[in-house]
Amino acid sequence: MVHLPNGHGSAELHDGLIRVLEGLPALLRRSLTWDQGTELARHVEITKATGVPIFFCDPGSPWQGGSNENTIGQLRQHFPKGTA
């Protein structure tokens, strides 16, 4: 989970993801799977900076993002939108 207090665009996500990924142990930085969204437009730069490959769910294949959606649901129980 990356807190983005200054917006949700690609620049903010770029900086936030690099900051968070660099702070994780190597075991937790093996890969990142993302749904389709413009906020990760700078994914190549993030991979170059962190060494973490980023994959995307195929359009029209919602089952590929199932674990992502489940994780978001679990996190929202403890961190509602708008909270830090």
Image (cartoon, rainbow, N blue to C red):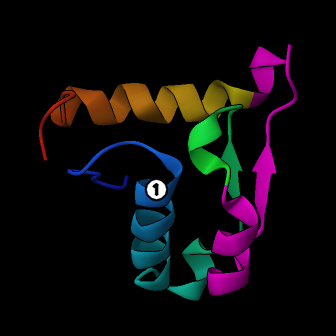
Q: Can residue 59 be seen in this view?
A: yes
x then y, percent, for residue 66: 66, 25
Label 1 is placed on what type of residue? Leu
Looking at the picture, tell me which residue is in the foreground, 37 or 29: 37
- Identify the residue at image location x=45%, y=80%: 24
x then y, percent, for residue 60: 86, 13
Residue assigned mark 1: 13
**Is residue 3 left or right of 28 when viewed as pictured?**
left
x then y, percent, for residue 12: 40, 57
Q: In which quarter of the image is residue 52?
A: bottom right
- Identify the residue at image location x=24%, y=51%: 6
Q: Residue furthest left?
A: 83
> What span is in magenta?
42-64
At label 1, counting other C-alpha atoms closer than 10 Å, the crowd grade (few under 14, some 14-19, many 20 or more) is: many
In the depicted structure, whether residue 66 falls above or below residue 30: above
SS at badge 1: helix
